[in-house]
Image: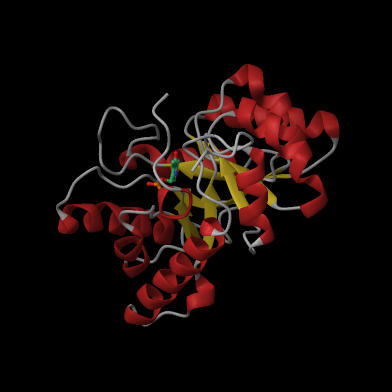
Amino acid sequence: MPDSPAREPSAPEPGVVALRLAAVRARVADAALAAGREPEDVRVLLATKTMPLDVVREAVLAGADLLGENKVQELVAKAPGLADLAPTLHVIGRLQSNKVNLALRWAACVQSVADLDLAERLSRRCEAVDRDLDVMVQVNVSGEDTKAGVAPDAALELAAGVARLPRLRLTGLMTIGAASRDVALVARGFARLRGLRDALVASGEPGTGDARELSMGMSGDLATAIAEGSTMVRIGTAVFGERPRT
Ligand SMILES: *Cc1c(COP(=O)(O)O)cnc(C)c1O
């Protein structure tokens, strides 16, 4: 059978995305119940990197209302074509300081704040355009040097600094789990993030009292993350299939 020319060869067939999204929601619900939690306490964010607009639209039409992009270029390329469906868009990848203005045009939240310099830039820009912005502090719980994020030991100080900045609302912490098949090791990293979140919320620092979000868990480790308290899993592969190598 010939391939449809309008669709990239790597993109999933029509209908598949909706089915896989339903399967992910079922996995999330199962994991939540198994952990003694309510399924609705864990939101699903779809990580749409490399996926073309038509595939992302299909996911949103199937009920995905929360999307994350790693690259501002991709955010800017797809967001106008999603505007009629009004999904909430988050930045979940490294944000270069020269892309802050572009990101703020479309993003409701930047999850990948890992230094005060970026936070200050975001805050100043929000003041200039008279808006508020949700942010999370990204923590590198695994210590893998390929991963972005502030070191766990420095996370609370950074989070308190971020929470004090005008127009930024600190909603919680984000991490990428260890790249390991050792489930106990991965779980310890997620538990570390939860411990930091608990300490943050209890710190009494201005602006930290509501920073309860734990953005952790991806296609391969979502159940582990939910068992450790995740409130938001970020899912790509389990819904969109393997990404093309770039
Ligand atoms: C790609 C990505 C995800 C999703 O990963 P999958 O393993 O494809 O589910 C989640 N978070 C971030 C920051 C990502 O870059």
Residue 110 in view of the camera: no
Q: Position of residue 37 (x, y in %)?
A: 42, 79
Residue 19 in view of the camera: yes
User: As drawn, is 108 to the left or to the right of 15?
Assistant: right
How many numbered markers are drawn? 0
Q: Position of residue 177 (x, y in %)?
A: 31, 47
Q: Residue at x 32, y 69 (%)?
A: 227
- Tell which of 45 and 56 is nearer to you: 56
User: As drawn, is 78 to the left or to the right of 222?
Assistant: right
- Tell which of 137 and 157 is nearer to you: 137
Q: Position of residue 41 (x, y in %)?
A: 51, 72
Relative to 73, is 236 above or below? below
Q: Residue at x 73, y 25 (%)?
A: 101
> Residue placed farthest to the front in the image?
1
Residue 85: quadrant of the picture: bottom right
- Tell which of 101 and 49 is nearer to you: 49
Residue 161: quadrant of the picture: top right
Q: Quadrant of ligand 1?
A: top left
Say which quadrant the C terminus sits in: top left
Q: Residue at x 83, y 28 (%)?
A: 128
Q: Position of residue 141 (x, y in %)?
A: 30, 44
